[in-house]
Amino acid sequence: MTTNNSTEQRRIAIIGGGPGGLTLALILQQHGISSTIYEREHEDLSHERGGSLDIHEESGQLALKEAGLYEAFLQAARFEGEDFRLMDKTGTLYLDEVADEEISEEQRRPEIDRGVLCDLLLNKLDPSTIQYGYKLEKVVSLGEGKTELHFENGHLTVADLVIGADGAFSRVRPLLTDTDVEYSGLTMLELNVIADKHPDLAAFNARGKMFALDDHKGILGQLNGNGRIKVYASFNASRDWLDEIRNDNPQEMKATLLELFHDWSEPLKNYIRYAEDAVVPRRIYMLPVGFRWERNSGVTLIGDAAHVMSPFAGEGVNLAMLDALELAIAIVRNKQTPVAIEEYEEKMFQYASEKAYVSNENLILSFSENAAPKFAALMQSYQDLYEQQG
């Protein structure tokens, strides 16, 4: 696809250097279009954030193909990470899926650690594209599609197109809407277990994900490529609950979790007992299902900034990368920025709304009565539908 000079000269600012922002900049680079990523952190912290990601063939993998990284991704990905175990609090198994070696690569959803994925993107991206230590302080619309960006380090610049790729608490979103994220009612405490130190738990968790759901709570285990099991102790709680128990003593926080899960099976409680001395509390936020904003001729959003939802559809990074793909191609295809934004947003609003609905339904189901058998039935219905479609 060719690119004309008027397209190349647009000053494109991407706020946020996560997988979505990096993918967008790299696909633009592949088409000869320069952009600048402004990242608030002073260095890449991807390896410290998030766990293993399953990359879907109809979204994340498509973006990686357009970015010229698909083969490198296949080399780095873990196909065995698709294994999935589902149980209740007693350890009764409802699903014990082992990745099917006969399925073609294009039909599968291999796992890759977030940090490894970002490394792939960064290694191919022109280093001058990303500016670290640029925390956005204020955005000002100047009219005629131009936007002034003010950063806390004193830097000021004007862009013809600003893309908010800056997550759930986006500083760019208020330029488009008064709607803000809402607390979903779900709280997670993230822990890490070093698998080699605890072979009993490593065998119990197996090669991929383990979900234990019961009593409106969940223990979720996910084996990462670095030998750690990322654990999410999850439950419904008031928004203020974390403030009441938060402290600098991880042993006390783990003791609080063990009390919350006191009648769960011993192997499941080991996910908490064996965890290293670091507990990361997370409130799960979401935007309303079907959320849209009033169009701005020089500003748009991708990823969680556009459609943050619960993690129970497994779509977060995949949607961010699909957004990046759709927006990049729209920019390449259209000389006029407002036309590119409209083309992208109309597509994005449609698919993001569908995924947000599924995510919310799965969130409700996962923390309802008898969640494990309900979740197993849902997974079976998806499998039956897939087989019917051939």
Image (tube, rainbow, N blue to C red):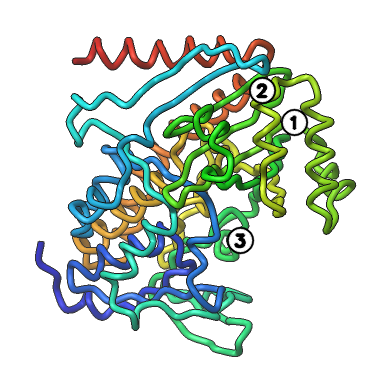
Residue at the far bottom in the pictured view: 154
Residue drawn at the location 56% of the way across and 47% of the way down: 194
> Does residue 337 sit above or below 86 in this rendering?
below
Identify the residue at the far right of this view. 244
**Circle 3 Cα neighbour tier, 10 Å, few/some/many (<14 / 14–19 / ≥20):** some
Sequence-earlier tag: 3 or 2: 3
Q: Which mark is residue 37?
A: none
Amino acid, disc 1: Asn
Q: Secondary structure at mark 2?
A: loop
Residue corresponding to mark 1: 236
Mark 3 or 1 closer to N-term? 3
Between label 3 and label 1, give the one nearer the viewer: 1
Which of the two residues, 348 or 31, is positioned nearer the viewer here?
31
Percent of width and height locating residue 195: 53, 43
For the residue marked with disc 3, what is the amino acid? Pro
Report x, y in % for residue 10: 30, 77
- Residue with the mark numbered 3: 174
Observer-nearest of 230 and 132: 230
Amino acid under disc 2: Phe
Q: Quarter of the image containing the N terminus?
A: bottom left
**Gap between marks 1 and 2 measured at Cα:** 8 Å
